[in-house]
Image (cartoon, rainbow, N blue to C red):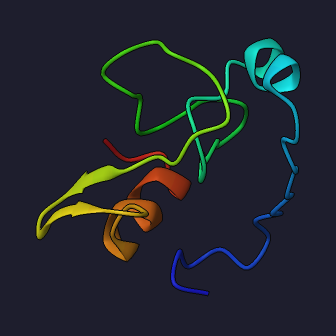
Amino acid sequence: MESGNPGHHVSLLAVETDEQAQSLRFPGSPTIRVNGHDPFPAAAETYGLTCRVYTTPKGLAGAPAVDELVRALNGEP
């Protein structure tokens, strides 16, 4: 495992309604949470069923870069 910790547990949750998205404070798909915290907080606090983009070293992307994810999983800034 790239994070160096094979003990990490990954859970997937399908957010299927706008009401569920509002309740979960879901800023769009994909959203990644580590111990309930979003390590890549969205600039605006808007929640709903939408696509999400992330700022990466190579520009906007549909997910954080792998090294950014590894740092988040290891609790690094």
Q: Quadrant of residue 8?
A: bottom right
Q: Is residue 5 above or below residue 23?
A: below
Q: Is residue 13 above or below residue 18?
A: below
Q: Is residue 35 above or below residue 73?
A: above
Direction from residue 38 to residue 41 in the image, left or right: left
Q: Is residue 13 above or below residue 24?
A: below
Residue found at x 56% / y 29%: 27
Viewer-proximal residue, 26 or 3?
Answer: 26
**Residue 42, how many percent across, how many down?**
39, 28
Where's the C terminus, which quadrant?
top left
Residue found at x 43% / y 63%: 63
**Residue 37, how many percent across, how many down?**
61, 29
**Residue 49, how many percent across, how many down?**
67, 36
Where's the N terminus, which quadrant?
bottom right
Q: Residue furthest left?
A: 58
**Residue 62, how many percent across, how many down?**
41, 63
Residue found at x 78% / y 21%: 24
Residue found at x 46% / y 51%: 72
Direction from residue 23 to residue 29 in the image, left or right: left
Q: Quadrant of residue 65?
A: bottom left
